[in-house]
């Protein structure tokens, strides 16, 4: 008997120690005197109440399930939640990365990379596969090409979002900076006479906190000495600072990503291409420092040039 078979028998023994009536009530399982029944990713399974063996439906027949990951997932689901009553659902989806891994549970990184390659350019095939597995197509979220709610286990569904890679057209696109940063039509407020002025704001995930028409960076040298050249004036072109955190709508990528910003102006007669100077800062999150051994540049090296 190999280690996988030993784990399966350990799972069986753990299952048989549980109060099956409590499991039935907890998960709303179909049952009879011999078996408990549940669906796992579109397939009907039954667990023998006397010996814990798991079988799956093939037409009108039942076949012994020897797929280790399936068997252990069902045992883990039934026996390892640690609560007699399931907590109420919050109604909010949680990213896969927030789940606590156990034992040899795979991380999200190899999952994304492996299957992104396999399904690239196959939107229709992914859609049909989701339907075959009992998925329900829902409203597209965050610009995804496909969004499906996939039933995995009783009271446990997964939201699958699929963005197909594309080098010619953007996978995710926005209608304008004012929309992307949450400014609606513009970033202004009006006084009692109807005259517009800049309106700064900051929210949890996006904002426009900075606006300046004076160049205050040249008043003094780094030594503290006054900059005499500055006597000619401190006027500057308007400068703006905006931010957007993709926390609720993360943009996933495994190898590369390209982000472009088109600068379109409006002089009330027509649209035209502007020539503004744009500087950006992007942050990404990773679960370890592996593969990143460069020292973070000091302040002087980070100044825009």
Image: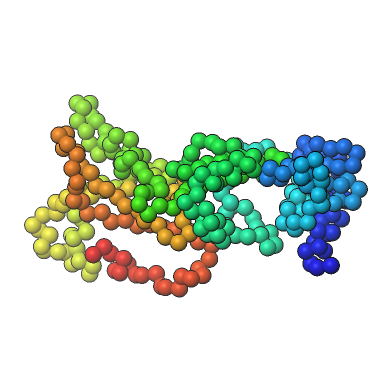
Residue 243 percent location from the top left of the image: 36, 49
- Which image quarter holds the C terminus? bottom left
Indicate the colouring scheme.
rainbow
Q: Indicate whether 297 appears above or below 157.
A: below
- Residue 14 visible? The answer is no
* Residue 241 location (% of width, % of height): 30, 49
Number of numbered callouts drawn: 0
Looking at the picture, does residue 30 appear above or below residue 222? above
The answer to which image quadrant residue 9 occupies is: bottom right
Q: Quadrant of the N terminus?
A: bottom right
In the image, farthest residue toward the left: 232
Residue 29 seen in render = yes
Nearer the observer, 52 or 297? 52
* 215 vs 138: above or below: below
- Residue in front for this viewpoint, 181 or 228: 181
Q: Residue at x 48, y 59 (%)?
A: 254
User: Which residue is depicted at the point 76% across and 53% down?
Assistant: 71
Task: Single out the residue that lies furthest toward the top.
Answer: 193
Residue 129 horizontal/vertical position (percent): 59, 45
With 131 as the anchor, is 201 left or right in this view? left
Q: Which image quarter: residue 11?
A: bottom right
Residue 148: percent from left, percent from top: 56, 41
Task: Name the residue located 57 percent from the left edge and 42 percent from the top edge.
Answer: 128
């Amino acid at each position: 008997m190999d280690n996988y078979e030993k784990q399966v028998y350990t799972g069986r023994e753990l299952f048989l120690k549980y109060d099956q009536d409590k499991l039935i009530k907890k998960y709303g399982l179909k049952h009879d005197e011999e078996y408990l029944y549940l669906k796992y990713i579109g397939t009907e399974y039954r667990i023998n109440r006397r010996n814990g063996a798991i079988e799956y439906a093939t037409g009108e027949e039942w076949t012994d399930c020897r797929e280790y990951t399936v068997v252990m997932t069902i045992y883990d689901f039934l026996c390892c939640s640690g609560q007699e009553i399931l907590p109420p659902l919050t109604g909010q989806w949680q990213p896969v990365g927030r789940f606590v891994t156990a034992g040899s549970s795979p991380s999200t990184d190899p999952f994304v990379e492996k299957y992104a390659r396999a399904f690239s350019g196959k939107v229709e095939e992914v859609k049909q596969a989701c339907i075959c597995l009992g998925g329900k197509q829902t409203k597209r979220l965050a610009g995804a090409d496909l969004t499906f709610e996939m039933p995995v286990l009783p009271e446990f569904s997964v939201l699958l979002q699929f963005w197909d890679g594309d080098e010619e057209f953007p996978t995710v696109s926005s209608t304008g900076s004012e929309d992307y940063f949450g400014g609606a039509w513009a970033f202004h407020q009006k006084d009692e006479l109807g005259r517009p002025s800049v309106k700064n704001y900051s929210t949890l995930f996006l904002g426009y906190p900075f606006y300046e028409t004076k160049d205050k960076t040249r008043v003094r040298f780094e030594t503290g000495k006054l900059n005499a050249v500055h006597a000619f004036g401190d006027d500057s072109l308007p400068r703006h600072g905006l931010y957007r955190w993709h926390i609720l709508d993360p943009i996933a990528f495994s190898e590369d990503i390209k982000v472009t910003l088109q600068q379109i102006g409006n002089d009330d007669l027509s649209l035209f291409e502007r020539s503004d100077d744009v500087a950006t800062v992007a942050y990404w999150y990773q679960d370890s420092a592996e593969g990143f051994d460069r020292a973070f540049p000091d302040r002087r090296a980070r100044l825009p040039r």
